[in-house]
Amino acid sequence: MTEPCELLLSEALRLLRNRSLSARELTVSCLSRIESHDLEIGAFARVFADEAMERAAVLDRATVLDRVAVLDPAAATGRLHGIPVAVKDLIAVKGHPTEAGSRAYAGYVPDRDAAVVGRLREAGAIVVGKTNTHELAFGVSTPSTRNPWSLDRMTGGSSGGSAAALAAGMVPAALGTDTGGSVRNPSSYCGTVGLKTTPGLIDRDGLFMISSSYDVIGPMTRSCTDADLLLAAMAGTRPLNRWRGDVEMSGTVVGLPGDAYYEGLSVAPPVERALHNKVDQIAALGASIIEVAPPSHREHAEPGSVVVAAEARLLHERILTEMPELVADDIREFIGIADGLSSADLAAAHKAVSDFRQRWLRMFDEVDFVISPVTPNHVPTHGLNQIEGVPLIPATTPFTFPLSGAGLAGLAVPDAPAADGLPVGVQIIGPPGSDRRLLALGKNLETAGFLASALAPLDGTTKNDD
């Protein structure tokens, strides 16, 4: 029997709106799942059980949306009425610690919600807690969180807590952030859906940032239909209404990068199989597939790192100066890239990233979307700090970090589990402003039965090789 916490966001909304399910019942189910399984998974940094229950009671007493509002989501003020949502611990929630996974910010309690959290509350969402993140989002493994599919595997990062909470059925929706892959990689490793949004779409007020140029907030769910619903609440209607949200597959052209795109990289066989599966499925729906030649990840790696490191140093200057011992060595080492840079060096890095962006944008004169792996790796072991001698960040982000530099939108979607039963994802990339069209393409795949985000097996069959 399906527990309420296992419902997709869209399924839960339907039941809430026809009064077959109450906000209290759904919230109790989510909190019970968290209590039963989060000790071993570690998705949450903290849970707001009492506050969530009080909020659910208020919503259950409130007037249910009228039929016009339900049929016209743009007119609805409670588009997420009664839906529990988890918020990554980089995003401010009023009255609760927001510590960015770092000792340097321990005890920081914001006196107001981040803008995106405020919008979720206005839409009727219930914030149930803060999810774990890699320290300051400077990492791709989220050490405090284990993958619900196999506790010996990593979730990816830095939004690993949000992805794990979704995969374990603890919540139907979560917020993540993405600088160089932090929404997409965890989504791929945990078998969920994650959208790296177009810069500027989601208000970042109240976000602990690494990089003012690269950081975005993105929706994380278990289906593209759900991600679209969550995105609408996060963004509000005005910015989304500027962009089309439909895709006619018979007129769609999807680019498949050639060998040069993978320069120097070895892609794990399960990842390669998933990519070709998704290409075949998209073609089966009527889209044309053509080979394209995007710029290599190598062209972006150095200037992109310089830009992010320089911006991170500026954003976190106080703690780096006053309490460097509270920041992990590898983070200080990365930010140290910016040490001694001249203004000319930084200007050259920005120009290189800008030129890289323009080359990617010209790609979309030929195609509507590009499809690629999310990451070359297949769910690495928990606790690794390198893969085949390459540090973990560059080893896992060569297909995600450059796209952030190019200012593109990117959607991570699951393929069928690999032969070992573990998740594997694929990334569909679009130009700036294509967020809703990416999700529309994903919904077309869902309708055809090609996307099915499964829950991790939490009934004792989850692997744990420790």
Image (spheres, helix red, strand yellow):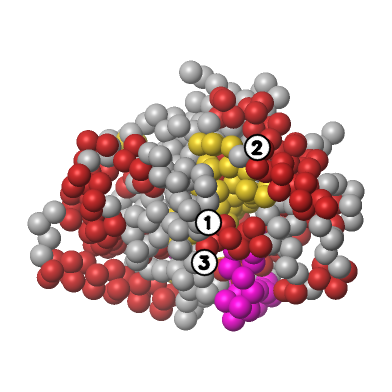
- Residue 202, numbered label: 3
Q: Secondary structure at mark 3?
A: loop
Name the residue nearer the viewer: 123 or 350: 123
Name the residue nearer the viewer: 374 or 38: 38
Q: Secondary structure at mark 1?
A: loop
- Residue 49, numbered label: 2
Q: What x and y, as percent, mark residue 106?
A: 38, 39
User: Hey, what amino acid is under mark 1?
Assistant: Asp
The boundaries of the magenta stretch are 230-259
Quadrant (top left, top right, bottom left, bottom right) of the N terminus: top right
Asked if 224 appears above or below 379 in the picture, the reply is below
| Residue shown at the point (35%, 66%) measured from the top left | 213
| Residue shown at the point (43%, 38%) measured from the top left | 142
Per the model, the C-alpha gap separating discs 1 and 2 is 18 Å
Residue 248 within the magenta-colored segment of the rendering: yes
Q: Earlier in the sequence, mark 1 or mark 2?
A: 2
Q: Which residue is mark 1?
A: 113
Q: Residues within 10 Å of mark 3 (few under 14, many from 20)?
A: many
User: Hey, what amino acid is under mark 2?
Assistant: Ala
Left of 329 or right of it: where is 437?
A: right
Q: Earlier in the sequence, mark 3 or mark 2?
A: 2
Q: Nearer the viewer, mark 3 or mark 2?
A: 2
